[in-house]
Image: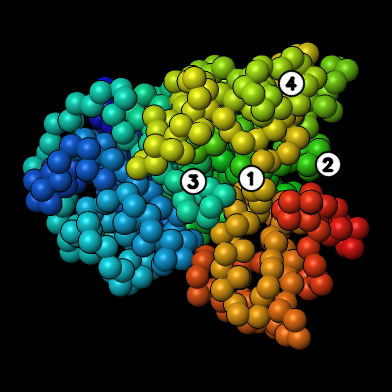
């Protein structure tokens, strides 16, 4: 079983169908894409001497070659390690080292940064568009390498509360089950013709590319390479039966776009990765009609815990319709979802506890981290760290995020990572980082700082420290200077109280 067989099938059955477009321009059809992927796979195995199960990192912005490299890895029996292109060089260094990637395919924009890193295991860096990359098209074709269902396919790095990313090992079976859930629970109506990749392909948008390869859909890369409301509206108008995955903040930006636009070709906006406020959800239904669907998932069970279908969004006669719109839907088809207390006992509807999941989409393990694997997967159940409650109809509403995760613009940001950086400043005595609600980003990062006695710390100094250590998007948007942090009797900072103080001071 190899997830790449879906591309081979599409290349044979629908060779003339557009596989990838940049903006409104078709750049490759499925016949040519399948052929290129086979030849790149051959180069990876024969020219670069990679063996089954070896890791290949992908550090690039959204581009047509992203799909080529992703599927070539699987075709060759290798494991893909997609990395968020927005990360800091030190974060790239950690992921490349920890994964043990032997080869990294990178974009021109990131090539210098990746090339300047000292990674002992990394044998080769190939820049997309370079002579090395293009010459792989001239290799012989390679037969798809057989893989077992539990073999690793995608090493998905998802940050933890320690600030060190953890690599969730996603298998071919995980990705197949996720794709089936896409059709069963998230995007249920045919035809499946176009997906716009406005969100990073290293994460949710790339994961949902797999289902669209199964249906030989057109993968549209915006000319900008990212998300711009005016551009997205133009692409919706230019393509047929359009779907795309979006963070709630992206939906909010679409709703704030001032011009009247035609969205007849829009099939679905699939949102997830953060809370969608009820007001925005209602505005989206008013603007787009019954074309919104929600998913709730984690890297450890990719895109697959619960879903709120487009039909559920418009059940106007249900007495709990607003509560359901505020929920994250019902369990997806390939998983069981329960609520557990601190001892692992399952709770009834109406009782708040930790969301736990088991099923075909749950990761195999954390790479090189057996202790974290044991802590997270217990008796076959994945403990998500999120707290929620089921209603009597089986709809799950999330109540809080354990581990103090901040979700800004659909991107996970973990406070401790930022705190550890800020504490490197010699004049910082204590610091606590929280998320502040924001209408545009969902949440923004705020740092509460206690200075050493008699010291004054300028925000610019803390900004510069962050920019030297972590990705720009993780940098606090506000620094609040206080004499002390709220703590309990054991000296632990009470972030819940800090959030209350922050809310009252707005």
Q: Earlier in the sequence, mark 4 or mark 3?
A: 3
Q: Which residue is mark 2?
A: 279
Residue at 84% across / 17% down in the picture?
A: 318
State the CA–CA distance, disc 2 to disc 1.
27 Å
Residue topped by disc 1: 403
State the SS at label 4. strand
Callout 1 crowding tier (Cα within 10 Å): few <14, some 14–19, many ≥20: some
Mark 3 or 1, closer to the camera: 1
Q: Mark 4: few, some, or many residues within 10 Å (few <14, many ≥20)? A: many
Return the x and y of residue 16 as percentages of the image width and height.
30, 34
Which comes before the other along the chain, label 2 or label 3?
Answer: 3
Which quarter of the picture shows residue 212?
A: top left
Real-space CA distance between mark 4 and mark 3, rounded to the nearest whole angstrom: 26 Å
| Alpha-carbon span between mark 3 and mark 1 | 13 Å
Q: Secondary structure at mark 2?
A: helix
Circle number at residue 390: 4
For label 3, the residue is 158
Q: Residue furthest right?
A: 504
């Amino acid at each position: 079983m190899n997830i790449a067989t879906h591309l081979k099938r599409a290349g044979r059955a629908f060779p003339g169908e557009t596989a990838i477009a940049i903006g409104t321009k078709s750049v490759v059809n499925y016949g040519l894409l399948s052929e290129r992927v086979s030849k790149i796979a051959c180069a990876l195995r024969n020219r670069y001497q990679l063996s089954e199960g070896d890791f290949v990192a992908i550090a690039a912005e959204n581009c047509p070659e992203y799909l080529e490299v992703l599927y070539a890895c699987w075709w060759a029996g290798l494991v893909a390690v997609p990395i968020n292109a927005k990360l800091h060089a030190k974060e790239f260094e950690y992921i490349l080292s920890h994964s043990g990637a032997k080869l990294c395919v990178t974009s021109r924009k990131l090539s210098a940064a990746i090339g300047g890193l000292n990674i002992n295991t990394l044998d080769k860096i190939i820049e997309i568009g370079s002579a090395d990359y293009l010459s792989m098209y001239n290799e012989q074709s390679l037969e798809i390498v057989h893989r077992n269902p539990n073999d690793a396919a995608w090493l998905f790095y998802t940050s933890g509360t320690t600030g060190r990313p953890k690599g969730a090992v996603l298998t071919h079976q995980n990705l197949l089950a996720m794709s089936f859930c896409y059709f069963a629970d998230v995007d249920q109506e045919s035809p499946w013709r176009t997906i716009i990749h406005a969100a990073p392909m290293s994460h949710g948008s790339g994961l949902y590319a797999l289902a669209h390869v199964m249906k030989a859909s057109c993968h549209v890369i915006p000319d900008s390479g990212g998300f711009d409301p005016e551009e997205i509206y133009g692409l919706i108008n230019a393509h047929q039966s359009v779907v795309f995955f979006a963070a709630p903040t992206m939906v909010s930006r679409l709703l704030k776009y001032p011009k009247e636009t035609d969205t007849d070709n829009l099939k679905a906006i699939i949102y997830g990765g953060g809370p969608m406020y009820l007001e925005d959800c209602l505005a989206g239904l008013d603007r787009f009609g019954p074309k919104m669907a929600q998913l709730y998932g984690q890297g450890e069970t990719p895109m697959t815990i619960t879903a709120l279908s487009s039909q559920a969004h418009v059940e106007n006669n249900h007495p709990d319709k607003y509560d359901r719109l505020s929920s994250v839907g019902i369990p997806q088809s390939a998983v069981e979802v329960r609520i557990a207390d601190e001892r692992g006992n399952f709770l009834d509807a109406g009782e708040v506890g930790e969301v736990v999941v088991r099923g075909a989409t749950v990761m195999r393990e954390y790479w090189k981290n057996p202790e974290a694997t044991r802590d997270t997967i217990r008796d076959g159940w994945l403990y998500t760290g999120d707290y929620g409650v089921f209603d009597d109809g089986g709809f799950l509403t999330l109540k809080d995020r354990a581990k103090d995760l901040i979700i800004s613009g659909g991107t996970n940001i973990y406070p401790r990572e930022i705190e550890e950086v800020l504490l490197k400043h010699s004049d910082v005595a204590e610091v606590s980082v929280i998320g502040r609600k924001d209408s545009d980003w969902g949440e923004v990062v705020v740092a509460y700082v206690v200075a050493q006695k008699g010291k004054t710390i300028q925000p610019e100094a803390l900004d510069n420290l962050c920019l030297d250590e972590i990705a720009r998007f993780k940098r606090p948007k506000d620094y609040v200077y206080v004499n002390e942090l709220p703590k309990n009797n054991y000296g632990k900072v009470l972030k819940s109280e800090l959030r209350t103080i922050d809310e009252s001071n707005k």
